[in-house]
Amino acid sequence: MALNKKQHRPSLDDLLAELRLTTIRQHYEDHAQQATQETLSYQTYLQGLVECEIECRRQNRIGRLLRQSRLPLEKSLETFDLTRLPAKMVQQIRSLLDGQFLARTENIIAFGNPGSGKTHLLCAIGQALVQQGHKVYFSTCSLLVQELLRSKRDLSLDKILKKFSKYDALIVDDIGYVQQNREEMEVLFSLLAYRYERGSVLISSNLPFSQWESIFKDPMTTAAAIDRLVHHSVILELNLKSYRMEAAQKSQRKVR
Ligand code: ADP
Ligand code: MG
C-alpha cells in the first residue's frame, strides 16, 4: 500500500517545535504577512526571523544569569547617580563597564564609609557584566562565609571553590563588616587564594587595608590576602558622604 507522503508530513509548527525554534514558531506568520506587504526577499524574511530567535534567546539567557547572580535588581546603573563621584572615578568606572578586566582577572576593591554607595556601585557593575553575558555571583561576605563553612563541614570545600570558579565575577559585599572567627576567616582566605588569577573578585569594605588584621586575625594571612587581591586590581575610594544621610537631610530641609 502506497503511503500518502503528504498526509504524514509534519506541520511547520511541529517541525519548528522539534528544532526548538520557539520564537520563529511564534512569529513566522506575522513576519510572512509583513514580508508580503513590504515585498521583502525570502532571504530578508528568513534573516528577520532568525534575528528574532537569537535576540529572544539572548534575553532569556540574561534573565537566567541575572536570577542566578542573586544581584539585587534595583541597584542598577540607571538608578545610580554617578555625578556624586569625582570625574576621574567616573571615568574609571566607565572603563570597567566594558568587562575587559574580567579577562585579565583583575579585581575591584571599593572602600568607603557606610552609605557611600559601595554595594550599589558593585551591583551596578555586576548587572552591566551580566548584560554582556558574563556569569556573576553576588553575596554578602557573611553569607558567603557561611556557605563555605557548610561545605567545609561536608568535606566539600574543594567542590564549592570549583563551583565558584564558573563565575567570571564574584562579588563579596562588606568584607570585615561582621567580625569573623578563625575558622570563618580561614575559609574566606581559601576562597581568595583559590580565586587568585583564576577569576575576578569585586569586594567592598568599610575598613581600609590597615585594619584588615581584624578580619584575617594574623599579620601573615592579612598580608597574603591583601597581596593576592591587589596584585591585579582597581581600587575605588568612595570618600563620600552617606547617600542616605544626604537624602534624609534634603527631605528635612523641604519639610521646614
Ligand atoms: P554602602 O554599601 O557603601 O554602605 P549602599 O550602596 O548600600 O552603601 O548605599 C546606601 C543607599 O544609598 C542605597 O539605598 C543606595 O541605593 C543609595 N545610594 C548610594 N549611593 C548612591 C548613588 N550614587 N546614587 C543613587 N543611590 C545611591
Ligand atoms: Mg554596603
Image: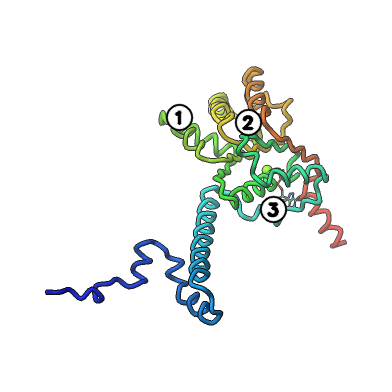
Q: Which residue is disc 3 drawn over?
A: 77
Q: Is mark 3 within 8 Å of ligand 1?
A: no
Q: Amino acid at mark 3?
A: Leu
Q: Secondary structure at mark 3?
A: loop
Seen from this angle, which residue lies furthest top? 220
Task: Tell which residue pokes out farthest to the left in this image.
Answer: 1
Asked if residue 226 lies left or right of residue 35, the reply is: right
Residue 254 location (% of width, % of height) = 85, 62
Q: Is residue 205 above or below residue 79?
A: above
Image point (74%, 30%), residue name: 208
Figure quarter occupied by ligand 2: top right
**Residue carrying label 2:** 179
Q: Mark 1 to mark 3: distance in Å?
A: 34 Å
Report x, y in % for residue 37. Answer: 54, 82
C-alpha distance separating marks 3 and 2: 30 Å
Distance Cα–Cα, label 2 vs label 1: 24 Å
Question: To which residue does mark 1 refer?
Answer: 158
Residue 8 is drawn in which quadrant?
bottom left
Dot 2 alpha-carbon crowd within 10 angstroms: few under 14, some 14 to 19, many 20 or more: few
Disc 1 residue type (three-letter): Asp
* Residue 54 location (% of width, % of height): 50, 60
Could you tell me which secondary element the residue under label 2 belongs to? loop
Amino acid identity at mark 2: Gln
Q: Is residue 171 above or below residue 44?
A: above
Q: Earlier in the sequence, mark 3 or mark 2?
A: 3
Q: Residue at x 27, y 72 (%)?
A: 9
**How many dots with numbers?**
3
Along the viewing direction, whichever of 233 and 48 lies nearer the viewer: 48
Left or right? Give the position of 221 relative to 55.
right
